[in-house]
Image (spheres, rainbow, N blue to C red):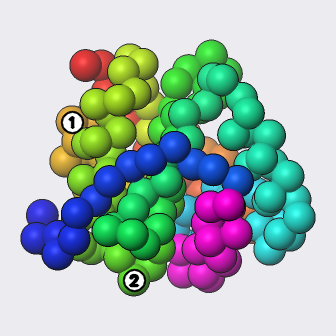
Amino acid sequence: MKDIQYEIKLRPTVADDLETLFEFQLDPEANHLAAFTSKDSANKEAYINKFTRLLADPTVNNQTIMAGTVIVGSIAKFILEGDAEITYWIDKPFWGKGVATAALKDFLAIETTRPVFGRVAFDNLGSQKVLENCGFVRIGTDKGFANARQTEIEEFIYRLDH
């Protein structure tokens, strides 16, 4: 992991964070790598409405990733079909700097639900490394329609038990 030049901290996501987080997910390359995005990720009103609802959902743990005083991403635990899953999004200028790994390690210390799963597009090598660096083990594959690519692709399923 590369040295981080700033302190990474998590804090609970608040409604005021959503404008910034919305902007991050508009990046075409980031959208392509995430692959499994919402059907209309450019619809700001839909994004704000969806995430405002999620902020009020007690089964979702939404955290904003800070580098010093700057918002650089988000990380969350949610329930999908009875399983706890994690998701994270890092602003592109902070890719490859160890931010996601540091944030996920911190997140796993406060979000203790286990097992917890992570899913990642087959070609998102950076995200695969983040999960593996945090102790997740690849347990299988699945196929699904990736809105960002408008086609079905393979995704890898990771699991963390402790």
Callout 2 amino acid: Pro
Which residue was labeled with disc 2?
Answer: 93
Residue 20 located left or right of residue 119: right
Q: Is residue 159 left or right of residue 23?
A: left
Query: What residue sits 49% from the left and 53% below the top?
Result: 64
**Residue 142 figure quarter:** top right
Residue drawn at (22%, 71%) of the image: 6
Task: Give whichever of 139, 16 is nearer the camera.
Answer: 16
Is residue 43 a member of the stretch shown in magenta? no
In the rendered image, the vertical position of residue 75 relative to residue 124, given as above or below? above
Residue that mark 1 sits on: 135
Residue at (80%, 58%) from the top-left corner?
A: 48
Q: How far from the left and from the top, in percent, is residue 148?
A: 69, 68
- Element at badge 2? helix
Query: What type of secondary structure mainly makes up the magenta span?
Result: helix
Residue 23 on the magenta span? yes
- Mark 2 and mark 1 lie on one chain; the one further toward the N terminus is 2
Looking at the rendered structure, the kind of residue marked 1 is: Gly
Left or right of 55, for residue 53: right
> 35 or 142: which is nearer to us?
35
Span colored in magenta: 16-30
Image coords of residue 38 (percent x, y): 76, 57
